[in-house]
């Protein structure tokens, strides 16, 4: 039985090396941050069904290493 912090990979039944394999959540986050991710969301502030403020949020999340130069 997988632990609470494990993620079970599904959809890989055709590949026996990955079928039923569980991956720790920290390993999944490490792979995600190694390649990078873009998070997006919307915030809408409304009163009486009238939209007053609409904010689009986007964030790029990526790990930083000494090998990669920082551009800012």
Image (tube, rainbow, N blue to C red):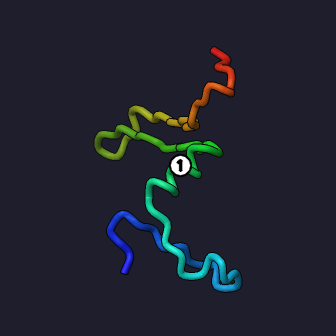
Which image quadrant: the C terminus? top right
What's the residue at 46%, 35% (across, down)? 54
What's the residue at 38%, 75% (across, down)? 2
Whole-percent x, y for residue 35 in the image: 65, 45
Read off the residue under disc 1: 30
In the current view of this chain or complex, which residue is farthest to the left?
48
Q: Nearer the viewer, residue 58 or 38?
A: 38
In the current view of this chain or complex, which residue is farthest to the top?
72
Whole-percent x, y for residue 26 in the image: 45, 54
Label 1: element kind: helix
Q: How many labels does the image show?
A: 1
Question: Which of the 4 quarters of the picture holds residue 46?
Answer: top left
Question: Which of the 4 quarters of the picture holds residue 53?
Answer: top left
Q: Is residue 26 above or below residue 41?
A: below
Whole-percent x, y for residue 19 in the image: 60, 81
Q: Is residue 62 above or below residue 2?
A: above
Q: In this view, does 27 lie above or below 60?
A: below
Report whether 23 appears left or right of 49.
Answer: right
What's the residue at 29%, 44% (across, down)? 48
Whole-percent x, y for residue 28 in the image: 52, 57
Label 1 Cα neighbours within 10 Å, binned few <14 / some 14-19 / many ≥20: some
Which image quadrant: the N terminus? bottom left
């Amino acid at each position: 039985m997988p632990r609470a912090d494990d993620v079970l990979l599904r959809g890989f039944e055709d590949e026996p090396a990955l079928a039923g394999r569980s991956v720790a959540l920290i390993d999944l986050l490490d792979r995600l941050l190694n390649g990078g991710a873009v998070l997006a969301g919307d915030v809408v502030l409304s009163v009486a069904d009238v939209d007053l403020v609409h904010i689009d949020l986007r964030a790029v999340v990526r790990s930083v290493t000494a090998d990669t130069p920082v551009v800012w």
